[in-house]
Image: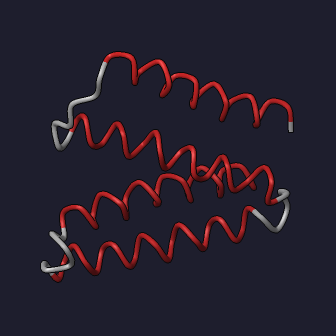
């Protein structure tokens, strides 16, 4: 269950970052509220995960999920342009996240 909490925390990190972008500098109340709710849920699930996982494992995985997820949302939803070589480093990030999980 701990890993489910950690994945949920990462997904909510992507959610709040996306809502923050959509809030347009916190000028749209609905998206601003969604940002705050997403932050609370993300930190809440991270707190639950760190009850049973070391911080040295939980935090990098949480931020990695958030980073990769934010990249994917940026590319798919906001049409961000990513240089082809950047995808290599994104793949390395994913490999690092998996490596931390497998070796922990």
The residue positioned 40% from the left and 24% from the top of the image is 86
Give whichever of 57, 33 is nearer the camera.
57
Residue 8 lies, with reference to residue 29, above or below; the image says: above
Q: From what the image shows, is residue 32 above or below residue 77?
A: below
Vertical position of residue 72 compared to residue 42: above or below? above
Total labels: the figure holds: 0
Left or right: 56 in relation to 15: right
Percent across and percent down for residue 84 are 32, 16
Residue that appears at 39% across and 17% down: 85
Q: Position of residue 2 (x, y in %)?
A: 75, 55
Q: How is the image coloured?
A: secondary structure
- Hey, which quadrant is residue 24 in on the image? bottom left
Q: Is residue 39 left or right of residue 60?
A: left
In the image, is 85 to the left or to the right of 21?
right
Instruction: Tell me which corner region of the image, top left, top right, bottom left or bottom right, holds residue 102.
Output: top right
Observer-nearest of 2 and 82: 82
Q: Who's the residue at 17% across and 43% down the image?
A: 78
Q: Position of residue 14 (x, y in %)?
A: 41, 54
The residue at the point 13 percent across, 80 percent down is 27
Q: Position of residue 5 (x, y in %)?
A: 65, 58
Q: Is residue 104 left or right of residue 63?
A: right
- The quadrant of the image that shows the N terminus is bottom right
Quarter in which the C terminus is drawn:
top right
């Amino acid at each position: 269950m701990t890993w489910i909490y950690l994945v949920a925390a990462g997904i909510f990190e992507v959610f709040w970052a996306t809502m923050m972008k959509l809030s347009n500098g916190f000028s749209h109340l609905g998206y601003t509220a969604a940002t705050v709710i997403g932050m609370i849920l993300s930190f809440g699930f991270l707190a639950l995960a760190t009850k049973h996982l070391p911080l040295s494992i939980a935090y990098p995985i949480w931020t990695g999920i958030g980073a990769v997820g934010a990249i994917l949302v940026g590319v798919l939803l906001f049409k961000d342009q990513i240089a082809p070589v950047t995808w290599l480093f994104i793949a390395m990030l994913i490999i690092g996240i998996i490596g931390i999980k497998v070796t922990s």
